[in-house]
Amino acid sequence: MNRFVTFSAALALVSCAACIPAAHAAPPVAKPLVAQSLDSFMQDQARIRKDMQPGGQYGYISNLEKNRVEASLAQMQNLLTANKSKADMSESDKVALVNAQEEVNGILEHNDNNRLVCEHVAPVGSHRPITTCHTYAEIMEQRERTQHDMQRMQATPQFKSGG
């Protein structure tokens, strides 16, 4: 009977969660880059380049993705330099600007150290999956520690015992 009451209460809470109005939902996250004018773009560009350095918000970005971001930033700077603002651009330039901006935002959002990554897997020895969540930075730090430990173990000489 106790289990039934607990299950019923949990079911009621879950069903009430769907009743929460959208006004109480989390606000949308601001995009890392929104290019409206050359001045605001130059400030955002400097901040992004600083944040892509080790220890920054996007410090774990790969060199390939960093090069893609740099190429898109250069393309956006050329488009904004040729025009005073986004409103002065031709339609094809606006499309090129938005495409470059979305590429940068997609890469940066994927490499954001504060991005939460959750997985739902069964631990070894169990059939009941559990959900664990870690930030992207925590995952990357753990990966670096593991690689460092593996390299250290491989560098340590192994002696055979016995004869």
Image (cartoon, helix red, strand yellow):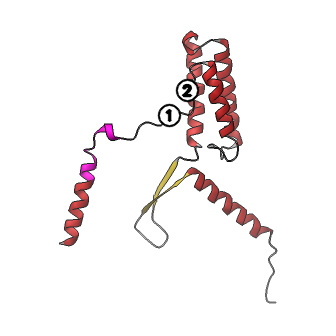
Residue 130 image point, x, y percent: 42, 63
Disc 1 designates what residue? 30
Instruction: Evaluate if marks 2 and 1 touch, with contact meaning CB atoms under 8 Å apart.
Output: yes
Check the picture and name the quadrant holding the C terminus.
bottom right
Q: Which residue is mark 2?
A: 34
User: Looking at the rendering, which quadrant does residue 93 occupy?
Assistant: top right
Residue flagged by tag 2: what amino acid is it? Val
Residue 3 vs residue 27, the one in the foreground: 27
Residue extending farthest left: 1
Question: What range of the chain is rendered magenta?
Answer: 14-25
Q: At 70% across and 42% down in the image, what residue appears? A: 53
Element on which disc 2 rests: loop
Observer-nearest of 54 and 129: 54
Mark 2 crowdedness (10 Å alpha carbons): few <14, some 14-19, many ≥20:
some
Q: Position of residue 1 (x, y in %)?
A: 17, 72
Q: Residue at x 47, y 37 (%)?
A: 29
Q: Residue at x 67, y 33 (%)?
A: 68
Q: Is residue 15 magenta?
A: yes
From the viewer's perspective, tell me whether residue 159 is left or right of residue 108. right
- 121 is higher (above) or lower (below) than 115: below
Residue 32 placement: quadrant? top right
**Placement of 123 over or under 134, stated as above or below:** below
Report the front residue among 4 and 45.
Answer: 45
User: Residue 126 location, x and y as percent?
Assistant: 44, 71
Residue 65 is inside the magenta segment: no
State left or right for residue 112 relative to residue 15: right
**SS class, disc 1:** loop
Q: CA distance from mark 2 to mark 1?
A: 9 Å
